Amino acid sequence: MAVLDVFCPRTKTTGHLDQSEADNPSSMSALYWMALGTFAIGTEGFMIAPLLPNLAQDLSVGLVAAGQLVTVFTLSYAFSSPILTALTGGIARRKLLILSIAGFAIANVVAALATGYWMLMAARILLALAAGLYVPNANALAGAVVAPEKRGTALSIITGGTSIAVALGVPISALIGQSFGWRLTFSVVGILSVLATLGLLFGLGKDVGAGLPVASLRERVAVVARKPVLLTLLVTLLWAAGAYTVYTYLIAFLASETGINGARASLVLFMWGVSAAIGVTAGGRLNDSLGSKNVIISSLAVLAASFVAMSLSAYLLSPAAARMPVLVSILFWGLAAWSYFPAQQARLISVAGVKLASVALSLNASFMFAGFALGAVVGSTTIAHASPAALGFVGAASIVGALILASAIMREKTAAARAELQLATTKQF
């Protein structure tokens, strides 16, 4: 059976519902319970960065030390997700999905009750382990609860949970955290996770996902060992590192360079989230009309320019004068960064091949979170040895690296295609 069957199982023996079951409204409701889980995970994963100043003060640690709470989550997710997903391949998919989101709920309770920095650090690791199991499993099961012609819609519902988290969950949680304390944000996410657990427990059929195959570690290593796939994944790594270099300390940047803080900073996050959601939607449509190459190159170029504009504004203008250009730059940042993502996924599928699409996309998520971890470290180093104003320049450098690598990969592929065409033409004559 092809690896893609993880997303596209064909018969009931592979965990797919028959036509009458797939058309049942309860099948669609199960998707929304899964999406509630990805919404909770997306909110928790992104919300910690805006809360870093409050966390640092409450836990009596420096801002850089607080930033390691971001690093440990993203790094734990990146490395644990493919390993744990492969090791738990023998567990029923439905059971694993419910256990992982329940574990995520418990870890949020631990985080909310944390008595110190290291207890919160341990909770973040537990959160990453649970999230790294839940998200790929939810994506896999999405194709098993609906009819084949509705799989695209099913996957968009699951990923939509993350998009809504970026657009709404993060700024709302930041506002809650700044107004009532960071512990309440973990409590709210924990409640959402409990609701998702109950919804899946009673709304997801017991036979869904039975027999779904899971790629082994050897299969994953074999995919990433292919040069075109590895280089494409490295573009994702550099993109994520550049974005998180700035995002992790965006609140500190706004406060020190523009004077925007508190509730106003939450409004900026809301603007960024909305622009990111628009970027994801636009990126998918532009990919269909213009092709992944054009979307990737233009998105990375605009993203790098946005970061440079942020830092230039901070260095050249007073805080009051810098506000508007910084806000405009953040708007374009959200649009460009997230319009890149669906195009990069499409590009990766074309490079890896349809049969290996599920493994390649899972690896792409791991490389993305590894990039987030790298970006958090680079951002903290920038804060420690330079200033928040320099974050845009440092982030832009990583994005330019992604742009150069992506351009080189595409030129090489184009040259190879031309050479192959020329060879085929020569053989004809």
Image (cartoon, grey):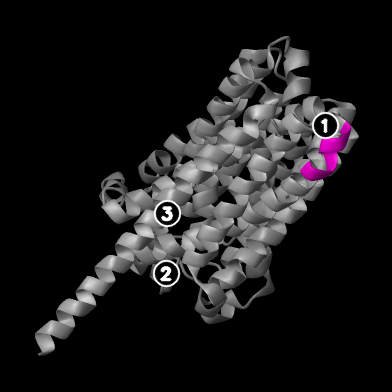
Badge 3 or badge 1: first in the primary sequence? 1
Give the answer, above or below, for where 231 lies relative to 80. Answer: below
Which of pointers 2 and 1 indicates the residue nearer the eye?
Answer: 1
Residue 87, image x, y percentages: 36, 41
Q: Main secondary structure of the magenta part?
A: helix
Q: CA distance from mark 2 to mark 3?
A: 33 Å
- Find disc 1 in the rendering and name its residue: 258
Residue 71, image x, y percentages: 55, 28
* Residues packed near mark 2 inside 10 Å, few (<14), some (14 to 19) or many (20 plus): many
- Find disc 3 in the rendering and name its residue: 406
- Find disc 2 in the rendering and name its residue: 9
Kindly tell me whether residue 136 is visible in this rendering.
yes
Q: Are marks 2 and 1 in contact (CB under 8 Å)?
A: no
Which of pointers 2 and 3 indicates the residue nearer the eye?
Answer: 3
Point out the image quarter for the C terminus: bottom left
The quadrant holding residue 277 is bottom right
Element at badge 3? helix
Q: Amino acid at mark 1?
A: Thr
Region in magenta: 320-325
